[in-house]
Amino acid sequence: MLATLGLDATSEAVYRTMLAHPQEGVATLADRLATPEGDIRRSLDLLSELALVRPSYERQGQLRAVSPEVGMELLMARQQAELAAQQLRIEASRAAATQLIAEFADLTPASSSPGVEQLLGLDAIRDRIAGLAHEARTDLMTFAPGGGHRAESLEASKPNDQALLGRGVRMRSLFLDSVRNSQTTVAYAAWLGELGGEVRTAPELPTRLMIFDRSTAVIPVSSEDSAAGAVVLTGQGTLMALCALFDNVWGAARPLGTAETVRDEGGLSPQETTVIRLLAQGLTDEAIAKRLAVSSRTARRLATDLMDRLSARSRFEFGVRAVQRGWLPHMAD
């Protein structure tokens, strides 16, 4: 009966029996249900994980079933959390489309892939970018993931930045929120802003990306090693999708010069909202740290603080309560 809510037949029988006979222990439950004690204990582990049983306040070492009203609400909230996590994974896959395009291009000869040009090595990548920057006339949109950028790298980019802005090219650059702690990157953003460039930050960026005049995009083949190779994309459909992706992230980002953190109706910062979404996707602290370009310790602190705010003892319980609080989206019935 409760299989659709995640309970197998044995666990459902144990739960029902504990509701009817709250005083009984493992051995008595096993006798009553004619089930081996090992199976009873496994069912109790599952029921405990689902928060359908809790330690007794009166009998130390015994478990007590929570009321059906509370239990069924928890099971339905669990399903909602799983559905929300699936929805978030689908949304994340859209952002990963650019990486898939790059991998496909890497496996396919350039001559058989119209609109795809392959670049191998850092020299080839930088030369091609320099040529595209020289030809740009209207727009340059950039995703720049990673932490704070090195001072020498930022200084090296300034001549090209000045030339582009001097020609009236609109420059929009998106960095991660973590660069707000980098004095060199903040100083560069201030310098760029004085010349008319625009810099914003977001909690997370899908890939490294440069789009010239909304008609040519450059993305790395590997997110792990952006210097190894890249592809230049000019297909109309691909560019429409990439421009839409950039515009969407840009619209939700905030100017780097903005000091105050904007919080939503639930009191969450953009970075906290991103951490919640990544936790729902099952990412570890280390993986979250890499996505946000922060230390593992910082990622762990962010996750722990969020769990404490909901008084959650496990990440599963956190997911359930996050759905109940409205921190994760509900799926339509």
Image (cartoon, rainbow, N blue to C red):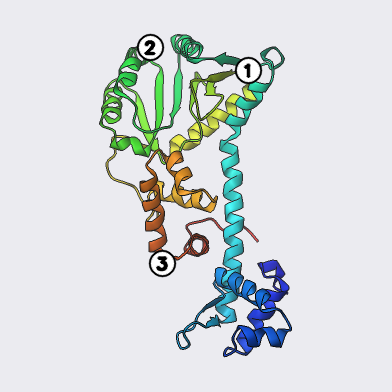
Relative image position of residue 272 (x, y in whole percent): 40, 50
Q: Residue under circle 1?
A: 116
Relative image position of residue 158 (x, y in whole percent): 32, 16
Q: Residue under circle 2?
A: 167
Residue mark closest to the camera, 2 vs 1: 1
Position above or below: 23 against 316: below
Label total for image: 3
* Mark 2–mark 3 CB contact (< 8 Å): no
Position of residue 66 in the picture relative to residue 182 (left or right): right
| Three-letter code, disc 1 | Val
Residue mark closest to the camera, 1 vs 3: 3
Name the N-terminal-most of marks 2 and 3: 2
Q: Residues within 10 Å of mark 2 (few under 14, many from 20)?
A: few
Q: Quadrant of residue 141?
A: top left
| Three-letter code, disc 3 | Ser
Name the N-terminal-most of marks 1 and 3: 1
Task: Residue 216: tell me if it is visible.
Answer: no
Q: Residue at x 58, y 30 (%)?
A: 99
Position above or below: 238 against 202: above
Which of the pair 92/301 is nearer the observer? Answer: 301
How far apart are the two marked residues, 2 and 1, measured between alpha carbons? 28 Å
Position above or below: 83 against 35: above
Name the N-terminal-most of marks 2 and 1: 1
How far apart are the two marked residues, 2 and 3, measured between alpha carbons? 55 Å
| Three-letter code, disc 2 | Arg
Quarter holding the N terminus is bottom right
Q: Residue under circle 3?
A: 311
**Element type at mark 2:** loop
